Amino acid sequence: MPTVALPAVGHLLHFELAVAYEIFGNPPGETTEGWYDVQLCGPGPVRVGPFTVEPDRGLDRLAEADTVIVPACADVDAPLPPELVEAVRAAHAAGARIASLCTGAFVLGAAGLLDGRRATTHWAHAAELSARHPRALVDPDVLYTDNGSVLTAAGKAAAVDLCLHLIHLDHGAAVANAVARRLVMPLHRPGGQAQFVSTPVRATGAGDHGLAHLLAWAQQRLDRPLTVTDLARRANTSPRHLGRQFRATVGQTPLQWLLTQRVRRAQELLEATDESVEAVARATGMGTATTLRRQFKRTVGVSPVSYRRSFRATNPN
C-alpha cells in the first residue's frame, strides 16, 4: 500500500490540506486494493485555518513515504519552519515523489527542489516565488507542473487537478475519473490550462445552453465527427464567439478540448475493455487506428498498445 504523507507544520490553509486528505484517503467505490495509506505528519498539534489538527506521525516519516504532498502556507512572508524544509529535502533524497499545493511551492523552493525545474503556484504569488528562487522556472499561467519526482500546483481548485493527476498516473484514467465523479468534479484538467479566465463568461439566458451544458452534450457524443460549427450551433452562438468562450473558460480552443476528451475516452476504453485499437478509434471519433495512434502518442507520450499493457496489468477491472 503506497504511503501519502501530508506534513502539518507551521501555518497552513485548511482547503488544500482537506482536499489532499479527502482525495487520497477515500478510495472510489470498491477500489481498495493498492490504495493509499494517508499519514498526517508533524511534531505536534497545528493550527489549520480555524481548526486544530493533531498529526498521527512525526516529520521523520516523510522520508519513508512514497509521495509527500505539501499543503499551502497561510503566509508566504512568514519564516518557513526549518524542520519542515529539511524533512521535505530528506524525503526527496530518499526517493519520495514530492508535490506542493498552491503556496506549498515555497517549501519546495526552500528545499532546493525547484532549481532548474518548471514550477507554479497561485498566480498572485508567482512573482515572489520567482524572486526568491531565481533558478526555478516559474510559470504563473498553468494549473500544475509535473517534473516526474517534483510536482507543483496553482491555487485552490488546481490542487484538486494535481491530486487527480497523481491518481491518474498511479491508477489510470478510469479510477481518476471515478474519484472526480465522487467529488462531483469535472474530469481533471491538463496542467497546461490557464489558472484563471481573463474574460467572464456571459450569463446564460433563455435559449442559451451555456458552456457547461455544451461540454456535457459533447462528451456524450465523442464517437461522432463533431465540428466547431456543430458545437456553435448547439450553443446557439457563432463559432468565433464559441472559440472565445472556450479559451476564456477552459484555456483551449474547441478542437483542442474535443481532442483531449477523445484521448481521455480512449484511455478509459484501453484500460477497461479488450476492444481493438481500431474499435477504440471508432468509439472515440478518431476514425482510424492511425489517427488514434498519432494523437494518443502526442498527448499521452506512449502508444495505445503500450498504455494498455501498463494499465490493464494494474487495473484489470
Image (cartoon, helix red, strand yellow):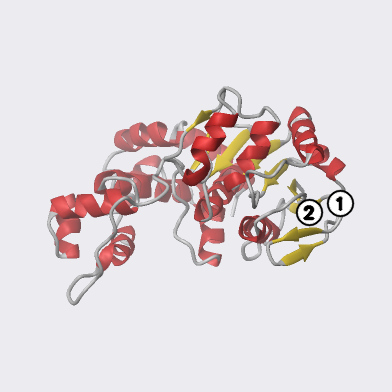
Query: Picture quarter containing residue 252?
Result: top left
- How crowded is the residue under tag 1: few (<14 C-alpha within 10 Å), some, or many (20+)? some
Camera-side residue of 15 and 32: 15
The residue indicated by pointer 1 is 57
Side of 96 where 223 appears, left or right? left
Residue 95: x and y, percent? 74, 31
Residue 195: x and y, percent? 42, 47
**Badge 1 element:** loop
Query: Picture quarter containing residue 100?
Result: top right
Return the mark for residue 24: none
Task: Reply above or below: 184 against 276.
Answer: below
Side of 18 where 286 appears, left or right? left
State if disc 1 and disc 2 touch (CB < 8 Å).
Answer: yes
Task: Reply above or below: 131 against 42.
Answer: above
Q: Amino acid at mark 1?
A: Arg
Camera-side residue of 225 and 257: 257
Query: Picture quarter containing residue 303?
Result: top left
Of the image marks 2 and 1, the number of the one nearer the N terminus: 2
Considering every residue shown, the one lying at the far bottom of the view is 206
Q: Amino acid at mark 2?
A: Leu
Residue 124: x and y, percent? 48, 46
Task: Reply above or below: 312 against 11.
Answer: above
Asked if one can make out residue 225 in the rendered structure from this viewpoint, the answer is no
Query: For the point 51% across and 46% down, which residue is it?
Result: 122
Query: For the point 12% across and 56% down, which residue is it?
Result: 238
Query: For the point 25% across and 54% down, which residue is it?
Result: 245
Camera-side residue of 125 and 235: 125
- How crowded is the residue under tag 2: few (<14 C-alpha within 10 Å), some, or many (20+)? many
Number of numbered discs overlaid on the protein picture: 2
The residue indicated by pointer 2 is 40
Side of 177 where 208 appears, left or right? left
